Image (cartoon, helix red, strand yellow):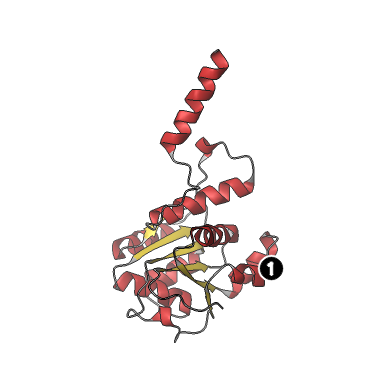
């Protein structure tokens, strides 16, 4: 845990137990590169297991990417209070169980409590829901959290960027999620730029 930096906007990154822990890891890396936000990290026990199962990162390596790491069970952590100002929160990935807990304001752990705080304080909350196919219960939960003010963002790959690796796909999705959170990053490949690159490549091929 690094020392909290005064007068620096804070952002919460949470990794729950759904497949796709790499999205949260990439978001932390992008925020570290920006260097303009104090990052607060919460990882669920299932999220920690998924990191080990799906990635080459250790839990300690992921935690080292954040400025402050909070225990999943610590409901007395600063981010559990609305008086602790944060820019917003990204749950990447967001499991169906976490979605249901947020939709029902359960506050059963720090991850869900911090998300609930963002909603009640009218702060931006982005949920990278990682579940497919969806049944009606999932869809109704998504509708409910959307009514409450959250943004549900399934991590759908953007193929107009011509990704070459899984890492490319994850990085673009994480950058897009941060953009939705109101944090633009230089690494985000936007449609206009991608379209211009494609047009340029076609022109060069015709010459």
Residue at the front extreme, as displayed: 6
- Nearest the viewer among 132 and 120 is 120
In the picture shown, does residue 86 fall above or below 126?
Answer: below
Residue at the bottom extreme, as displayed: 76
- Disc 1, SS: loop
- The image shows residue 101 at horizontal and vertical percentages of 43, 72
The residue shown at (48%, 52%) is: 175
99 left or right, relative to 2: left
Work out whether residue 133 can be spotted. Answer: no
The residue shown at (70%, 60%) is: 56
Tally of numbered discs: 1
Residue at the top extreme, as displayed: 207
- Quarter assignment of residue 69: bottom right
13 left or right, relative to 147: right
- The image shows residue 93 at horizontal and vertical percentages of 52, 61
207 left or right, relative to 192: right
The residue under label 1 is 58
The residue shown at (51%, 64%) is: 95
In the picture shown, does residue 30 fall above or below 193?
Answer: below
- The image shows residue 134 at horizontal and vertical percentages of 48, 54
- Nearest the viewer among 31 and 76 is 31
Figure quadrant of the N terminus? bottom right
Work out whether residue 178 can be spotted. Answer: yes
Figure quadrant of the C terminus? top right
- The image shows residue 80 at horizontal and vertical percentages of 40, 80
Give neighbour class at mark 1: few <14, some 14-19, many 20+ (Cα, 10 Å).
some
């Amino acid at each position: 845990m690094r020392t909290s930096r005064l007068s620096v906007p804070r952002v919460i990154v949470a990794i729950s137990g759904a497949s796709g822990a790499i999205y949260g890891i990439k978001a932390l890396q992008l925020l570290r590169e920006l260097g303009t936000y104090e990052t607060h990290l919460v990882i669920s026990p299932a999220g920690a297991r998924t990191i080990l199962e799906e990635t080459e990162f250790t839990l300690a390596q992921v935690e080292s990417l954040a400025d402050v790491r909070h225990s999943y069970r610590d409901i007395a952590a600063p981010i559990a209070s609305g008086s602790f100002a944060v820019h917003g929160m990204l749950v990447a990935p967001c499991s169906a169980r976490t979605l249901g807990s947020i939709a029902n304001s359960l506050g059963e752990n720090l991850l869900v409590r911090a998300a609930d705080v963002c909603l009640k304080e009218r702060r931006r909350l982005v949920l990278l829901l990682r579940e497919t196919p969806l049944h009606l219960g999932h869809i109704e939960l998504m509708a409910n959290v959307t009514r409450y003010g959250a943004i549900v963002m399934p991590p759908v790959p953007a193929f107009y960027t011509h990704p070459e690796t899984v890492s490319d796909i994850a990085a673009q999705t994480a950058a897009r999620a941060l953009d939705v959170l109101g944090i633009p990053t230089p690494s985000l490949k936007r449609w206009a730029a991608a379209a211009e690159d494609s047009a340029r490549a076609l022109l060069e091929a015709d010459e």
